[in-house]
Amino acid sequence: MAIPRVHLPLVHLRETDSTSLLARREAQEGADLPRLYVADTQTGGVGRFGRAWSSPLGGLWLTLAWPLPAVGGALEGLGLRVGLACCDALDAAIAHAGAPRRTQLKWPNDVMLQGKKVGGALCEVIPIPGGMAALLGVGINANFPLADLPESLRGRAGTVLDLLGIGLDLAGLRHDLTARLIEALTVPRPPGATVALVRQRLSGVGQPATITAGGATTSGVLLGLSDDGRPRLGTDAGEWTAPAGAELLLG
């Protein structure tokens, strides 16, 4: 996939606190957008719901900062489209390395490989001078051993190197992923089409699951997604659909 014709300055740092925090700071200070931020390591990476994200050397840590006035109405279902972009880019990189594997998507945008989380995305919309901007932050656990992650994460996280015994072309992965993120932002797709694609690779269907939303917790079995892309649980009280902004835990 070729990156769409767009001037995309690259800010590449050996180390930063967080590419998303850096992108936020610069965008709100009036930096020209779009812009791609990449770091070899992060000391304060942030995931969904403000959770810390460990970012050792050998992973792909980036944030795409994109001005929204040029996007129009393409934001509906963006989180799921970004998740699909991450899965498709990682699938292509793994295939290029000679070990074809199909990743799965844990709702809304965690990348799963052999039942372990190897990547994730954080989608934000922020005010900037003269308008709004989208920040798409992505982290991929690629070319480092699992031992480089904090012990508390090793039970549910994985790395491509540990799971498949291969190293990835990080520059190629970055190039391809960036193209797919730009497409997710700029090419409208009917919501139903996105949901259909996610259903094909949704992780955890048929497994016990818990959804937390608004301080309340609901447990059951993950049935799949509603037509508007929200998780559906089978509970003792019947079928239940999660509200927007919920958190899904499997197992």
Image: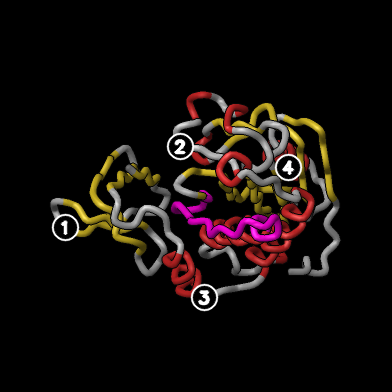
Residue 221 appears in the figure: yes
Q: Residue type at mark 2: give it.
A: Arg
Q: Nearer the viewer, mark 4 or mark 1?
A: 1
| Residue 4 position (above or below residue 137) | below
Q: Nearer the viewer, mark 2 or mark 3?
A: 2
Question: Which of disc 3 and disc 2 is earlier in sequence?
Answer: 2
Question: Which of disc 3 and disc 1 is earlier in sequence?
Answer: 3
Q: Which residue is mark 2?
A: 156
Q: Residue type at mark 4: give it.
A: Ala
Q: Residue type at mark 3: give it.
A: Pro
Q: How is the image coloured?
A: secondary structure
Residue 33 in the image, given as x and y percentages of width and height: 79, 53
Q: Residue type at mark 1: give it.
A: Gly
Residue 17 in the image, given as x and y percentages of width and height: 71, 29
Find the magenta span and give its range: 93-112
Q: What is the quadrant of residue 173 in the picture?
A: bottom right
Question: Which of disc 4 and disc 2 is earlier in sequence?
Answer: 4
Disc assigned to residue 238: 1
| Residue 40 position (above or below residue 137) | above
Q: Which residue is mark 3?
A: 190
